[in-house]
Image (spheres, rainbow, N blue to C red):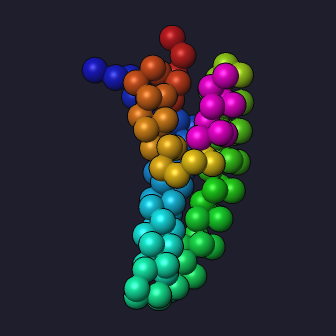
Amino acid sequence: MSRPLVPAGRLFAVAAFIEGFTWAGLLIGMAVKYSAIGNDLGVKIFGPLHGGAFLFYVVVTVLSALRLRWPWWATLLALIAAVPPLVTVPLEMWFRRIGLLSART
């Protein structure tokens, strides 16, 4: 059984999910926009949402790294994970599994 998440770990998990969710919405919006439908409503909605979620994720990542004393490679990997689509969610799952989101023992 995994260890319980500390508040900074929970916040990182939430930020990673929101960032991934808004990425998915933006990708779907772009697919609809450039399809035969040609409706750009999804991009208009999820573009700004994803921009805000991206910034929120970056700030939470830096705060979590400092608070939870992540090694430099974990911080760098978490920041890089925000760039390609949908990578923050599996990264969060991995960080949870290896204990980076829990209290150090």
Task: Determine the residue positioned at 68% across, 47% down.
Answer: 58
> Residue 18: where, in percent of width, then height?
49, 57
The image shows residue 74 at horizontal and vertical percentages of: 62, 26
**As rendered, which of 10 and 81 lies closer to the eye?**
81
Q: Which residue is outermost to the left?
A: 1
Going by the image, does 71 lie left or right of 102? right
Residue at left offset 60%, top offset 60%? 53
For residue 92, above or below residue 17: above
Task: Check the image and name the residue furthest to the front.
Answer: 36
The quarter holding residue 60 reads top right
| Pick the front one: 102 or 84 | 84
Magenta-span inclusion, residue 43: no
Q: Is residue 91 left or right of residue 3?
A: right
Q: Examine the rendered structure and indicate whether residue 23 appears above or below residue 45.
A: above
User: Where in the figure is residue 19, as x and y percent of width and height?
Assistant: 53, 55
The image quadrant where one finds the N terminus is: top left
| Range of residues picked out in magenta | 73-81
Relative height, residue 101 to residue 51 (above, below): above
Kindly tell me whether residue 14 is visible in this rendering: no
Left/right of residue 87 with respect to residue 71 in the rendered view: left
Residue lying at the far top of the rendered structure: 105
Query: Residue 83, can we see it?
Result: yes
Q: Quadrant of residue 72?
A: top right
The question of residue 80 being in magenta is answered with yes
| Predominant secondary structure, magenta span | helix
